[in-house]
């Protein structure tokens, strides 16, 4: 383990001038050190464990208030997980990364910081920048890309945007945490070269360029050493990259006092944990040097100074520098990150030769909107990053609003839902108040009320707070529900534990729901369900109640509970649902089908079993396309799914999890108000068997990254396999021409290194790739110019091709511009106990995806 006792002032002796600012000057460090000296050992140790689930301890005598951290990264939830305190819901990280636009990423971070400030939050626990090593990764939607350069650039922009508005950003999860199965205990076995060239590289720029104020360590081990104790927290994070911020643990990630001898700074949550009194004893008896504690506390004080939580220090940015309408930005970001995968022309009929999109709204008289997700859209993935927006615009909402003069029909087509869906607020009343919502009561062993809440939703999540989750015996949830159909429904609860279901005062079911797997996150956020059959009549209210035995739940996390009441989907007539959709499509000018995943497919806590769309959605698309050639499919998933019918439909638009303005953004794209601006940050396969790197299941506690540096498109190229849609691919509504490529004939590694040193280490652009880009189409549009390198005769194992740089460009119809893409010297490097540079010729490939690079040149790397 690295000895930290001599490194208390690591990277604090000089000031760094960046847009995010620092308190790293000698004077500021001296002031912080004076405050540190006023603290007792007990107080210093106390600061290093959370006060509760989301906050740190205040110490009044030095003017330190609490720090409030909150889950992001696609919105900021705040201190409570409560629909009465709604949050902006931005598009998923995969939508952000599909923009390939650092400007959008910076605005995303800035808007998140404004939302954080509204909720009193000092630190956003994001962005999540673990790589898309396998499409089966359950948290794939929350990460950026399969490529480290694309990830690094967008992550750095996000961090810069957030911190320029005075809120700390937390790149996570450091490092090689690219799977969910056994995530608490598994060891990622990975070579130093793959770590440096892929997994660490994804984090590097957010530290060296944007100077992130925090980094979150992961649950997993790396090469046998738990992340919170791993030397990687010191090297390269501190010693090479100059990180002077706080390493915060993932929740319960610190498991031993030994982690205090590593560069792990803050253990969350609290007040219980592996540190606390045990750490105090370890310092007292000499197992942990007090200098290590001082180093951590100094960093925590520096963070407090940066966010304005420490008296005598002005916040780095006392007022937000970038403020915009968050709802409008959510709409913009959704379209900017949506990818047009197919836009075919009809070969016969009235629209012969016309591409599928955009649709001419004024020419449509009847539109069939089909799909479970068209009405129940997924705007975000499942897990700890979930926020509760005030309002969601669904696809059917957006399409109907955009077509006031057309008849827009809706058919479910195929059931996607699995498990409990909460009851709509408009259909329920609180039996105590008569207002829309649900009565929640916590009862003791004598069934006396200890605590009550009037809630406006039937899905509840508690992470700390005032509710006596640990002290009460029974949780009682009751509503008066008025159904809108006459049917037999399945009503019940979703939670791990024992519960009783009542209808109009009659016990109709009593059962225990058992956890599936060992992951607490999955058990709480996507739990199993217990239901009972109820015969209901449209318009006739029924009083429903669930009693849940709190002592039967998993108590691994104090104060934590997730439970929902609601209805399971009716899956009794799948053929009829498809037939109804087919008839609606047959009678329509165009059929718009929204397919997608559910919370049991994409969520934190578990990995995916396959890439299939759930339910009968593939059958639905085939059946509809067979009767209406003008079929447009909208893909509402956060990560790759198989599209076996992709050549049978006229258009395919990938919208990911589009945030709360999803429906409006979708309508904007469908009817041509805006262009889908996305390009794929991840390869999409034809079949599961085609995927060259797939495994996310540890064996005997170990997951081996035996593929080394060959993941994503690199692995596809090495295996010579053809995907459905390649990395970087995406269509638009206009046409483009790339011409006049110019590349410097040589790069001198020594000169580039000297220039970088002169610039303070942040700049290592050794050359630029320039070309002329022309919009040859009839409307404005966006193109992403992508630059790749290759080295056919290399003496070492290299990817067939790898991304070196990119830029997003928007031009009016007929407009040309000179595009310049920086070419960093690091892009030519390989890791072997240090960055090495192989002299000789490299090929430069420039185009619009990894396989569409019409412009090529050669560049000579010189090593003087």
Image: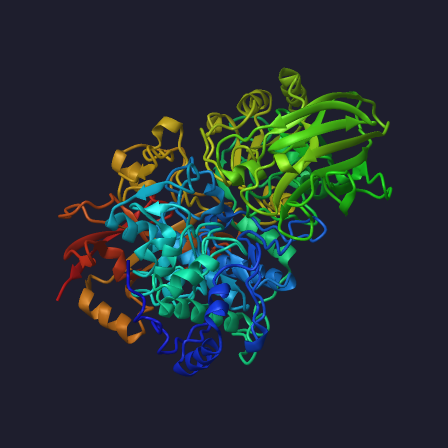
Q: So how many labels did they put on this image? A: 0
Q: Quadrant of the N terminus?
A: bottom left
At horizontal 27% and vertical 33% (from top left) the residue drawn is: 720
The answer to whether residue 369 of the structure is visible from this angle is no
Q: Residue furthest bottom?
A: 27
Front residue of 839/229: it is 229
- Horizontal side of 238 relative to 678 (left or right) equals left
* Residue 301 point in image, percent of width and height: 48, 71
Q: Is residue 36 above or below residue 509?
A: below
Q: Quadrant of the C terminus?
A: bottom left
* Residue 638 point in image, percent of width and height: 51, 40
- Horizontal side of 403 relative to 380 (left or right) equals right
Front residue of 658/494: it is 494
Q: Is residue 545 above or below residue 164?
A: above
- Horizontal side of 95 relative to 189 (left or right) equals right
The answer to whether residue 256 of the structure is visible from this angle is yes
Q: Is residue 844 above or below residue 624?
A: below
Q: Is residue 385 above or below residue 642?
A: below
Picture quarter containing residue 755?
A: bottom left
* Residue 119 point in image, percent of width and height: 64, 61
Q: Residue furthest front?
A: 285
């Amino acid at each position: 383990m690295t000895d930290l006792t001599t490194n208390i002032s690591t990277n604090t002796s000089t000031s760094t001038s960046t847009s995010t600012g620092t308190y790293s000057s000698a004077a500021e460090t001296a002031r912080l050190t004076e405050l540190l000296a006023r603290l007792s050992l007990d107080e210093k140790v106390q600061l290093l464990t959370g006060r509760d689930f989301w906050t740190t301890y205040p110490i009044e005598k030095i003017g330190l208030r609490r720090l409030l951290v909150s889950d992001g990264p696609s919105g900021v939830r705040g201190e409570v997980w409560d629909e009465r305190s709604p949050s902006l819901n931005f598009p998923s990280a995969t939508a952000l990364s599909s923009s390939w636009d650092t400007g959008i990423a910076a605005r995303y971070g800035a808007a998140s910081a404004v939302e954080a400030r509204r909720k009193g939050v000092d630190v956003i626990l994001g962005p999540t920048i673990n790589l898309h090593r396998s499409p089966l990764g359950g948290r794939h939607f929350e990460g950026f890309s399969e490529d480290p350069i694309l990830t690094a650039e967008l992550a750095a922009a996000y961090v810069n945007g957030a911190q320029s508005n005075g809120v700390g950003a937390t790149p996570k999860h450091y490092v090689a945490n690219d799977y969910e199965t056994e995530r608490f205990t598994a060891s990622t076995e990975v070579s130093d070269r793959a770590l440096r060239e892929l997994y660490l590289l994804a984090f590097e720029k957010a530290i060296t360029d944007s100077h992130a104020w925090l980094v979150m360590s992961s649950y997993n081990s790396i090469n046998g050493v738990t992340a919170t104790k791993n030397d990687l927290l010191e090297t390269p994070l501190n010693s090479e990259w100059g990180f002077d911020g706080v390493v915060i643990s993932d929740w319960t990630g610190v498991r031993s006092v030994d982690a205090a001898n590593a560069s792990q700074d803050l253990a969350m949550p609290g007040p219980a944990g592996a540190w606390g009194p045990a750490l105090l004893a370890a310092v007292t008896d000499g197992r942990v040097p007090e200098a290590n504690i001082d180093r951590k506390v100094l960093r925590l004080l520096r963070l407090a100074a940066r966010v304005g939580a420490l008296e005598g220090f002005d916040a780095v940015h006392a007022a937000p520098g970038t403020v915009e309408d968050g709802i409008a930005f959510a709409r913009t970001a959704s379209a900017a990150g949506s990818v047009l995968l197919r836009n075919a022309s009809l070969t016969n009929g009235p629209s012969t030769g016309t591409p599928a999109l955009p649709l001419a709204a004024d020419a449509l008289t009847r539109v069939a909107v089909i799909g479970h997700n068209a009405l129940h859209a997924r705007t975000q993935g499942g897990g700890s990053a979930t926020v509760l927006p005030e309002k969601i615009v669904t696809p059917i909402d957006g399409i109907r609003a955009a077509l006031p003069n057309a008849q827009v029909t809706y058919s479910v087509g195929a059931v996607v839902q699995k498990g409990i869906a909460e009851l709509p607020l408009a259909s329920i009343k609180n039996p105590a108040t008569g207002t829309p919502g649900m009565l929640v009561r916590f009862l003791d062993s004598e069934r006396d009320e200890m605590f009550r809440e009037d809630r406006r939703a039937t899905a509840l999540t508690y992470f700390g707070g005032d509710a006596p989750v640990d002290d009460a015996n029974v949780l009682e949830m009751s509503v008066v529900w008025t159904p809108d159909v006459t049917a037999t429904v399945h009503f019940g609860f979703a939670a791990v534990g024992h519960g009783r279901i009542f209808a109009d005062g009659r016990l109709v079911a009593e059962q225990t729901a058992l956890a599936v797997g060992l992951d607490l996150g999955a058990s709480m956020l996507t739990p199993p369900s217990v239901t009972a059959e109820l015969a209901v009549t449209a318009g006739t209210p029924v009083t429903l109640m669930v009693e849940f035995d709190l002592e039967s739940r998993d108590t691994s996390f104090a104060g934590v509970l997730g439970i929902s009441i609601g209805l399971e989907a009716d899956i009794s007539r799948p053929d009829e649902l498809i037939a109804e959709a087919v008839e609606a499509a047959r009678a329509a000018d165009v059929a718009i089908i929204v397919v997608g995943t559910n919370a049991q497919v994409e969520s934190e806590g578990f990995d995916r079993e396959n890439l299939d769309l759930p339910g009968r959605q593939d059958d639905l698309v085939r059946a509809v396309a067979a009767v209406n050639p003008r079929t447009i499919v909208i893909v509402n998933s956060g990560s790759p799914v198989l599209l076996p019918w992709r050549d049978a439909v006229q258009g395919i638009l990938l919208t990911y999890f589009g945030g709360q303005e999803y429906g409006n953004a979708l309508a904007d794209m469908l009817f041509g108000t805006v262009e889908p601006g996305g390009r794929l940050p991840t390869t999409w396969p034809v079949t599961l068997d085609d995927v060259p790197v797939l495994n996310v299941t540890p064996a005997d506690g170990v997951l081996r990254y035996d593929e080394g540096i060959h993941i994503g498109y690199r692995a596809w190229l090495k295996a010579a396999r053809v995907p459905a849609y390649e990395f970087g691919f995406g269509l638009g509504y206009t046409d483009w021409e790339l011409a006049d490529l110019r590349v410097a004939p040589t790069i001198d590694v020594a000169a580039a290194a000297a220039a970088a040193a002169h610039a303070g280490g942040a700049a290592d652009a050794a050359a630029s790739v320039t070309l002329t880009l022309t919009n040859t189409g009839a409307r404005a549009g966006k193109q992403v110019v992508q630059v790749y390198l290759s080295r056919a005769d290399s003496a070492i194992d290299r990817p067939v091709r790898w991304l070196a740089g990119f830029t997003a460009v928007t031009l009016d119809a007929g407009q040309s511009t000179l595009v310049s893409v920086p070419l960093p010297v690091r892009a030519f490097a390989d890791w072997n106990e240090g960055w090495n540079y192989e002299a000789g010729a490299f090929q430069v490939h420039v185009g619009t995806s990894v396989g569409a690079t019409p412009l090529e040149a050669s560049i000579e790397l010189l090593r003087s």
